[in-house]
Amino acid sequence: ASGIYEVPQEYQSRTPPYSKLISKLDAVRKILGNDQPLTLAEKILYSHLVDPEESLASSNGKVSNIRGLQYLKLNPDRVAMQDASAQMALLQFMTCGMSSTAVPASIHCDHLIVGKDGAEQDLVKSVATNKEVFDFLQSCGEKYGIQFWGPGSGIIHQIVLENFSVPGLMMLGTDSHTPNAGGLGAIAIGVGGADAVDALTGTPWELKAPKILGVKLTGQLSGWSSPKDVITKLAGLLTVRGGTGYIVEYFGEGVKTLSCTGMATICNMGAEIGATTSTFPYQEAHKRYLIETKRGPIAQAADSVNNSYGFLQADKGAEYDKVVEINLSELEPHVNGPFTPDLSTPISKFGETAKKEGWPEQVSAGLIGSCTNSSYQDMSRAVSIIKQAEAAGLKPKIPFFVTPGSEQIRATIERDGLIDTFEKNGAIVLANACGPCIGQWDRTDVPKTSTETNAIFTSFNRNFRARNDGNRNTMNFLTSPDMVTAMIYSGDMNYNPITDSIKLENGESFKFQPPQGEDLPSHGFIRGREEFYPEANPQPKPEVQVNVSPESDRLQLLDPFKPWSGEELSTNVLLKVEGKCTTDHISAAGAWLKYKGHLENISYNTLIGAVNKETGEVNKAYDLNGDAYGIPELMIKWKEEGRPWIVVAEHNYGEGSAREHAALSPRFLGGSIILVKSFARIHETNLKKQGMLPLTFADEADYDRISSGDLITTIDLADMIAKEGNNGGNLRVKVTKKDGTSFEILTKHTMSKDQVEFFKAGSAINYIGNLKKQ
Ligand code: F3S
């Protein structure tokens, strides 16, 4: 493709391969007959197809036959991994035997850092507690040429925005808020470790083509309204399931009025409506942000590909599967929660709703920052509120915490006096890390075990129970940093800073003026402490040893799962699960987070939340002789006896998240089939990736005919395998009851050609490893 500015060498690993993408898009347009307008999301996604012909062949040249129907095989440009999920991603990558990654990648140490007393003290403690894990990640980084952003350098999504996100980029990240990078016009998708390994090894990554949800923004934000309110409002409109299977694409005149970091906030929380990802068309604000983050040549390249080919905008007349409109001029600040991000209340109704619902009358703490809201704009607006309070002699009524998103943000706001204002006014500035956003808040004012309900106001993105301080009774209300900051001076749930006044000590009343802030620092960003920055373009060093101690309780090297023997599978029913069974039931989180890199240790949590259909008990399964065990304990016993097992369950098995341990652990403990009424799609894919056989009942009523202990044997599995490439099919199985009687039932599978290969090889990783060795 001509007319595209070629960036100097040092920027190349951070610039999407625009010329290649334009050529791919041309090929896609030929298949589609050139006359069908595409949305921006489709352009970015389809230009990353490995082979447009193969992926789009059965669409008959119609866009409407692609969305929601075709499986796309994609080549992402980059991978980012956070410390908790990177462990399993890298342990799996290591088994493939490659000496470097196929695409640029980065590791970010942010989730394992506890927030308590302030950055300095907290960081030292967290580095000491997690040293083994950080050392492992660092040595992997060195060995394979992956950028290692150490503890304290910042939160994955903020660092990605400042360094790697670029309009038109397609990236994967092992964290559900990876879509934050869509604020800078990328398609960035949150995945599990095994998916990341696809990209790291250059293996095509498969995604069912999403539908496109258009959000039209009109008008302009003003006063107290902020970008956060766009997404908190949208979450209220669409609910936590409203974005499932969609990419959210923003368009309309209102987009031009937003800052780049504001767009990132909006995309970040698209995860809360279940969207695959969210993105924005290329804007002046993007260009300014790229220049300010020292990526001028990349801005020039983006300009050129947009001007010559319109690549970074939707085509005129592009159609969305659904459209929602939000008028920014009429948008009011919203407060979402408790316990679900889609329970959205405008601030004008919040006090009365709180009273009606019996929520606490007082707010117990305020927290701003995190990957969602720690931009210069967010921080400067918060400080403009604090300064007004300071001038009026107002003191904060509740504890206030600030988490900067990166060392660059922290250093810049320190230089500009913002940190000083925060600290002088009682705020505790925490490390540049996730801290309270992921339950790593060592809270001292309210004990974890407190049975009394308390309310916190945060500018974060998630508010499930126990998410922040480990206390199930803490209600987290999600809102803008502006609202949180104003609230610390009142503490009253009934307070609305837009309309209400606060009594000063001298008896006068004080009312805040709307916050003022700067999109970008007028004196530019500074980098801050150099020790937090990794080498720009690290080269792999094969001589580096990655040490995993056999004694470690946190890390364990992976042994490849056994390939399929070619024989029928003969398995006993270990458990018949009743009702809802989410990834939390299958692989509990919380304290288990510690063992993410140790498959054996984390597997002791397998299905401990599941309800036994036959007895109504939680975490109880029965051996063939009737002896009772905890579920993982029986799995271990059967594994040791060489008895493969099957779990039978009901609808939407594995809903909730992409947590790959929910597939890894059952496989590790000797499971071979999961037979259910229906699967959550991502979990079904994860099972296939780990070499399990996920089956659904052709006739749901057969669920009632199966009991624990029954022997289930496949019939003509080899035949089914031989019909690979059919994208699913039937499999008969024989059910033999304990009394020796038997019958046959029909089940279904949805394995694609590649997924059949995963099954044969024992797992997707084995399959990839075999390919690489060939
Ligand atoms: Fe996740 Fe850390 Fe953000 S926990 S939500 S990436 S601050």
Image (cartoon, helix red, strand yellow):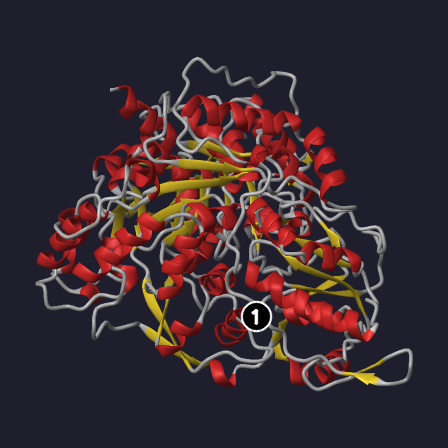
**Kind of residue indicated by mark 1:** Asp
Which of the two residues, 553 or 217, is positioned nearer the viewer here?
Answer: 217
Residue beneath the point at 66% across and 60% down: 368
Q: Quadrant of residue 556?
A: top right
Q: How many marks?
A: 1
Residue beneath the point at 32% across and 43% down: 77
**Neighbourhood count class around disc 1 (C-alpha, 10 Å): few under 14, some 14–19, many 20 upward:** many
Residue beneath the point at 53% across and 75% down: 233
Which of the two residues, 114 or 158, is positioned nearer the viewer here?
Answer: 158
Q: Quadrant of residue 225?
A: bottom right
Which of the two residues, 121 or 653, is positioned nearer the viewer here?
Answer: 121
**Looking at the image, residue 687 lies above or below residue 282:** above
* Residue 82 image offset from top left, x and y in percent: 53, 40
Query: Extreme right residue here?
Result: 506
Q: Is residue 750 visible?
A: no
Side (left or right) of 240 relative to 466 = left
- Give the residue at mark 1: 342
Q: Secondary structure at mark 1?
A: loop
Side (left or right) of 588 relative to 750 = right
Residue beneath the point at 44% across and 55% down: 179
* Residue 618 image offset from top left, x and y in percent: 68, 48
Query: Extreme front residue here?
Result: 523
Q: Quadrant of residue 289?
A: bottom left
Side (left or right) of 302 relative to 563 = left
* Residue 708 image offset from top left, x and y in percent: 56, 42
* Residue 651 image offset from top left, x and y in percent: 48, 57
Q: Is residue 631 visible?
A: yes
Report if the beta carbon of the residue with label 1 is closer than 8 angstroms to ligand 1. no
